Amino acid sequence: MIAEVIARLEEIVKYLKPLLPLANCHMVNFITNGMWEIYVPDAIKKEFSSVKPEVFNTIFLHYAKEISMDKIKGELESVPNFANFLESARNMCLRGISAQGIVVSLSDLQAKLAAWGYEYQESLHLEQFMTLKKVHEVEIMSQMVAALACISHASHVVDVGGGKGYLSSLLALHYGLRVLGVDSSHVNTHGAAKRTQKLEKRWNGLCQRTNILKQGDVPPCKGKHRKPHNNANSTKGCECTGAEADINCRLQSESSALYKQVTMFVTQQTDLCSLVKDHFNSDRCEHLSITGLHTCGDLAPACLRIFANKEECGSVSNVGCCYHLMEEEYVRSPFWTDTNPPLPTGVQPGFPVSKCLHMQEFSLGRNARMLAAHSLDRIGEYHEVSTDEIVSLYKTHSVEQQQLHVFFLLRVALAPVIEAVILLDRLLYLLEQGIQDSYLVQLFDPVISPRCYCIVSLKNYPGKGTD
Ligand SMILES: C[S@@+](CC[C@H](N)C(=O)[O-])C[C@H]1O[C@@H](n2cnc3c(N)ncnc32)[C@H](O)[C@@H]1O
């Protein structure tokens, strides 16, 4: 697999290199720096001058939403170079390479986990105290983390950059795992503790409500006079009943001991195992499972480096975000000085991590990394603004506005390609460390959660070798 990932990554980098100036330009300078003239391929400029701007929009929407192009053949034929640009970009992004087995689907990963002996515990669709986006992410990710922790016999899970504890609390309350949430922000750590207290108080009721909804029934209105269930099968202190509930409810006292929070800035040098022992007052820390949902900037590569370098870590699952916050090895910011370096001594930049890209001294650039976080899947959801000022500006700059639009479409088509480089670099880093069971999984619905790819990796787990 490593040879395939290297070949693919090199192919994408070769494609991307000449397009990086386009990806790295700053849109606010579009008019002042004459970017249309400089960066747009001549053939596309020619198409723009002979075809209505709406055609570009129509084609792009079909491309982004993966709608069949059969009904817009005429439009496609009128702008073949623009269509080719989009098609080439599509072939270079993670969607384009999923068919080649480098990116696996969630169901494929689940099949692998089942083959390794994991019996899935039902996930919990908990809608309280979270946005719907978070509900989607946490429901899927918690089930996968529970599986990884179980297969690797993890004594604890560390949720790095755990924020307000949405994932951690579910791992503890629903799956009964011991979880340490680590976040650099005290406000978040404090918020996580408060939120978990609130959640725990209402946990039994929430479980019951979720079970009733799952069975297609209407839960009783909330009110003081609702009598608690008192079923012989119910867990002590829990309103969920064995007969009507297959959701796992735990004793409140047990749950609060399962999830602890700590405020700390994590780098590749952080000793997560010692942190776990300190906070759980325990000598035991085995096959630690590291997880991170939307770990910004350098935090994602730091998690992978900790996992690869520490014997006591058994699994990692990581969804990154905010790629623009990463430090790059081969891009030197004009604001750095030798006395004021961007990173503490011994901490390496987050990009690249693989030997393959190090050997090429490859860099992306900040605006390209910023572009990588754009969502193709969300294109097409516009909000109208109509003020006199905007109308008058629009009239003055209407041609440039149309050019800007096409320019934006060209750049945004590169977004998933750049993300592919960043994520394949991370996957390759793990494979280069000899950790064969490393995967890139599309975990979430990209419309709901654009940063939807998860790096999943396991090493030294008990069933290893029986694959
Ligand atoms: C995008 S938020 C995600 C929070 C949470 N995982 C979630 O999904 O809701 C990223 C979190 O990582 C934290 N963070 C960023 N860099 C960190 C670092 N180096 N060490 C610890 N926490 C960090 C931030 O404070 C923030 O809470």
Image (spheres, helix red, strand yellow):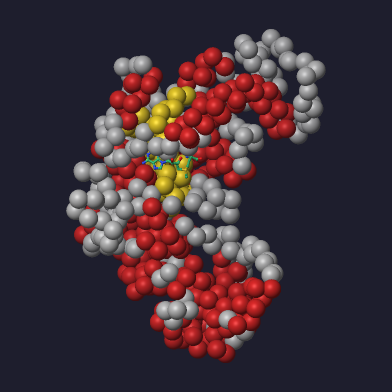
* Residue sitting nearer the eye, 247 or 189: 189
* Residue sitting nearer the eye, 152 or 222: 222
Question: Residue 396, percent across and down?
Answer: 60, 83
Residue visible at 68% across and 17% down in the picture? 239
Question: Residue 110, percent across and down?
Answer: 49, 40
* Residue sitting nearer the eye, 55 or 459: 55
The quadrant of the rendering that contains the C terminus is top left
Judge left or right: residue 192 versus residue 305. right
Residue visible at 67% across and 76% down in the picture? 391
Residue 425 visible in the shown view: yes
Say which quarter of the image contains residue 273.
top left
Question: Residue 414, percent across and down?
Answer: 45, 67
Q: Residue furthest left?
A: 338
Work out whether 49 lies above or below 244: below
Residue visible at 23% across and 63% down in the picture? 360
Label total for image: 0
Judge left or right: residue 382 versus residue 220. left
Work out whether 22 lies above or below 152: below
Say which quarter of the image contains residue 134.
top right
Please state the quadrant of the image where ligand 1 appears. Answer: top left
Residue 77 visible in the shown view: no
Work out whether 252 lies above or below 214: above
Residue visible at 43% across and 60% down in the picture? 370
Question: Residue 26, percent across and down?
Answer: 43, 69
* Residue sitting nearer the eye, 188 or 365: 188
